[in-house]
Image (cartoon, coloured by chain):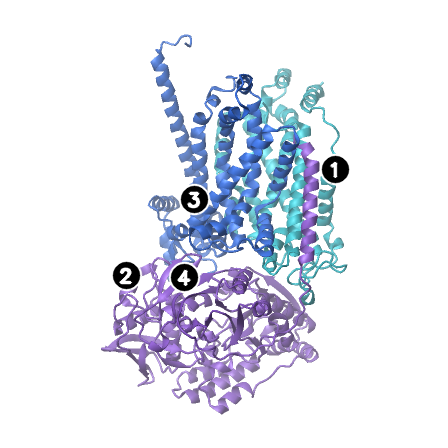
Chain colours: A blue, B purple, C cyan
Amino acid sequence: MAPGSAAAPAAVGGSRTSAAVRRVAGKLGGLLLTLFLASLLVFFSRFLVPGDPVRFLLRGREPSAEAVAAVTAQYGLDLPPWQQYLNWVGGILHGDFGRSLQYRQDVTIVIAERLPVTLLLVVMAGSIIAVVGLSLGTVAALNRGRALDRLTLIALTTLGAIPSFVGSIVLIAVFAVQLGWFPSFGSGDGFLDTVYHLVLPSIALALVFIVLIGKVTRSAMVEQLRREHVEVATSRGLARALVVRRHVLRNALGPIITVSGILVAGLFVASSIVEAAFGLSGIGSLLVQSVDRLDFPVVQAIVLLVVTVFVVVNAVVDLLEPWIDPRSTAGDSAR
Amino acid sequence: MTRPAHRPAALVIAGALSVAVALAGCSAAEPASVDTIDWSLTDQTAAPSGDIDSFDWVSYAEPSSLDYAYAFDYADNQVLANVCEALLRLNPDFSLSPGLAESFAHPTPTTWVYTIRDGVTFHDGTALTADDVVASMLRHLDPAVGSYWYSVYQNVVSIERTGDREVTVTMAGPDSVFNLAMGSSAGVIESAATLASAGAEYGNSTGGVNCTGPFQLAAWKAGESITLTRHEDYWDESLRARAASVDILFMNDANARVNALKSGEVDGGWMIPTEAVTQLNESGSGEVLFGLTTAVSSLIVSDTEGPLGDQRVRQALLMALDRQGIVDAALRGVGEVTDVLTTESVWGDASDSAFAAAFEDIESYPYDVEAARALVEEAGATGEQIVIATAPIASEFAVISQATAAAAQSIGLEAKIETVSPSAYTALFADPSAREGIDLFFTSWYLSSPDPLEMYAVLRTGEFSNYGEWSNAEFDAIVNEAVQIDDPTERTENAAEAQRIANEQLPWLPLYTAPMSMFLGERITGVTPSIAFLYYPWAATIGAR
Amino acid sequence: MTSTPTLAIGVLRSPRTPRPGIVVLASVLVLGAFALAAVFAPFLAPYDPHAVDFSAIYASPTLAHPLGTDGLGRDTLSRMIYGARTALIAPLIVVFASTVLGILLGLVAGWRGGWLDAALGRLFDLVFAFPALLLAIMAVALFGKGLVAPVIAMIIAYVPYVARLTRSLVAAERSRPYVSAYRVQGFGGAWIALRRVLPNVTPVVGAQSTLNFGYVLAELAALSFLGLGVQPPTADWGAMINESQAGLLGGHFLPAIVPAVAVVIVVVAVNIIGEALSDRIGGGMPA
């Protein structure tokens, strides 16, 4: 019943929907803009390198006339830069990322063949992060100020200081070599065997991020627990567990999900370290290998993929925010 | 809220870390002393008792392509040799026998005529014809393909089908050695139809290959493994595959490979690191065997404008190197010092006199630092600097670069070691600009044909792999003349002379020759541990123990 | 007269905090020890870090080699001391440069606002889309291995974090009474921004930046571990862990554990100091 509002209640609902639509459109626009700028950066980064682009792309390889012709054709090196970029983007939208110099194969296929391992690794690590991080954070929040809280924080701080390559080495040394409980190398045959091979790598990958989720969970839940509606619910005699589940956890999910954008991109990039340590043939190790073997088309494609995933996940999280935490749009005034 | 947690957190970490360090210290092995290994050559392993369902093999790297035109490295050829075949077959003892060509003739000095075997089928069931041979060989001449074996075909003028089952190769001038290379990947025959339909995807994990060998390519899991299955219609009964399927796993990490062999996870592998030989033999899951090689490890002199341009300095450096010490330190004694760039295994055709001339009438460069230093002074090179390139590829590289630097310094030269990445090191062999500023780099150069001239042809003036641009007119003349001599025995006289000149002039400094090594797991037997595994279908000979 | 408002702010900001605890002091001492080792390496290291000794491969800790030797017989302690150089100096450069640049850009964005702020915001969004390690790997792909390209890439990657924080703080400060007080007195905008607002903002941002040191150190060490950063045989903790992997399967843990422990210790120490500084200065985003 805003003063001066001539609109009927139905129109209020209408303006809310149109506001939502405008919001979505705005976010999508922002996403596309960022993707566009990112693709510009990825494509034109090559131009930062001084000297002949052909020599750059064929570093370490015999610059035979045929190789030069192939690379010139693939990148359109005889065309003006803007046209080169458009051709490249056009190719990508058709799923064509060019040819890999080391495998003499379409980059799309080279990446597609190695994607499953990384995906499984990220999913497994994500599950560990979610379960362990959420549990630790919840336990700490529910027992805030007491010994259990301090203990959990210690555990989190300790884990957080271990970079993933250190974690990998320690896990290999202890669980694979010394105890022999897990394999130290490769990704196995068949689904179950692969999962078995990925246990240690996913733990190594998850370690650093468990801290992030744990701390965010804890602070989000602590904040919720302090809120009036929890006190109201508890004072009404509702079981504490019910209160936690219904009110606290659900409302605390907001900040947690916000962080997941950074999480996903971070996981993909950190996977290159873990894959290198455990000899896994995934996207991460392909990235490092392609940098080492000067296979620029593959490097370009992987960087673009990771950035796209990151931007998209963030945008999705941004979009979903009002539905996860409706009060965030109304502001904290709704106490 | 975080500060109070820090004290106990820090203490926990400190405690955990000290425990870790203590554990690590306790479990560290005693310093490895440089004790040498007792080794001997194995000619042939016991024949299999019967067929086997499958076995696993491990390779240090994934083939980057199974296209025979690009198959130049161990990783590629060890797989390809079982799947594809060439006109001639290179046997484990490095002799050549008829392969897909049932006979060959050299009717005129400039022509080679091959009669193609009848009744051979490709893996897809189609029959082998002379057209397939022509198409396969012509690919090496196609600049768009950019074949790594181009140098074998550089004198070829035409390749034509001259009969129902006959192909004639015409050379620009008299060439008696072209045929000897037809047992390597340069002579591999693929179906013309497959080449046409696969196009640019031929040989990669999408296009695959369709050849005539005892195994066919069943699966290629990128980055993981290749699976081969028996080709039931293989033409040669004597080499019918004993195993129904073979899995070749790729493991870049040397210790992961060794562990897999030790635990029995894989049944065998080629090129075992010498550090692992003892523990593998003691593991009880198999044994390490040594066999024939054609590889000589040497130091390539890549800058003949620098101090190493003077023959006396090269000789001095070779004399200052404790080569036996290097073999003991780098290879645990599994190797022999050599003063020539070829092994005896490629001199099968030689007459006794040629053989003696090649291996006995040569300089032997004993380890003598004093004499070496005098030579350097005589050459006026005292105080000059040489740059040695190396890479963390294998432990030998570190030993050899350090030893060479130390040797150089002991005779009054300055030495600098330049470490590059393994990819950059490979570039030394391909890209002249990569060699700028480098005086020496290590190589283990193996031959793909039973022909010592294959080695010496490389050192002629202007050749691509004559990395130091060494030029000796007498040497060129002898090698070029040899190429035209039809009689193999007579040809080896020239080869011996070329070897003598190379031994005296030292364009490359020969260090040692190390046997090919292989691990044979307890489940399998039948294979010969020879470097011919690069071109001979070794996997077909493996069956149950 | 000019100092009072800022003093007041300073007093209002920092809560009544007790003296730094013993843990923080210990962290400072540890870091100081590593820093000294880095600076005085040639005098402290008992051996040449490149000196190979094949008669003493994978030696256990002895008086001659207090931390043992690696697979080529090189003394681990000496390599640790020299390794502290690349391990500590590179992240220091990244943090320092990104903080300076970030503060400058954030100041401009927060103070001027308007289109400049929006444009810079877009630029930062773009850089945010690239995780720091990925940017470093891309830099290596373009410019080759070593530390130069990754360090520059990481500076670029971390500037937006610093800038965003600075921007919010500056924007909040802009509306505070003391700023208008200065304006009324006739002081120019630039002067107020640089001489009054910046000093209030810098400590907070600086404290946050020290936390970045730990991340950067871990990321650069990871890069060397991947073989893309510091190249062997140069001693660097990440590169040492990479080279020591070969020995792990043979049961030789020490050459891997020692540099790993060092990385963890330094990261923990820096985090402790950073968080203590943040607490003390009352940092973080303003309400």
Q: Going 74% across and 33% down the picture, which residue do you hit?
A: C21
Q: Outermost residue toward the left?
A: B164
Q: Chain of mark 2?
A: B
Q: CA distance from mark 2 to mark 3?
A: 31 Å
Residue C137 makes an appearance in the image: no
Q: Chain of mark 3?
A: A
Which label lies toward us, 4 or 1? 4
Please name the residue that numbered disc 1 is placed on.
Answer: C25
Using the image, determine if residue A135 lies above or below residue C245.
above
Please name the residue that numbered disc 2 is placed on.
Answer: B197
Does the CB distance between marks 1 and 2 fall below 8 Å? no
Q: Secondary structure at mark 2?
A: helix
Marks 2, 3 in one chain: no
Residue B504 got which mark?
Answer: none
Please name the residue that numbered disc 4 is placed on.
Answer: B226
Please name the residue that numbered disc 3 is placed on.
Answer: A305
- Residue type indicated by callout 4: Ile
Using the image, determine if residue A246 lies above or below residue B252.
above
Which label lies toward us, 4 or 2? 4
Q: CA distance from mark 4 to mark 2?
A: 22 Å
Q: Earlier in the sequence, mark 4 or mark 2?
A: 2
Q: Going 68% across and 72% down the picture, which residue do you hit?
A: B382
- Residue type indicated by callout 1: Leu
Is the C terminus of chain C in the top left, top right, bottom left or bottom right quadrant? top right
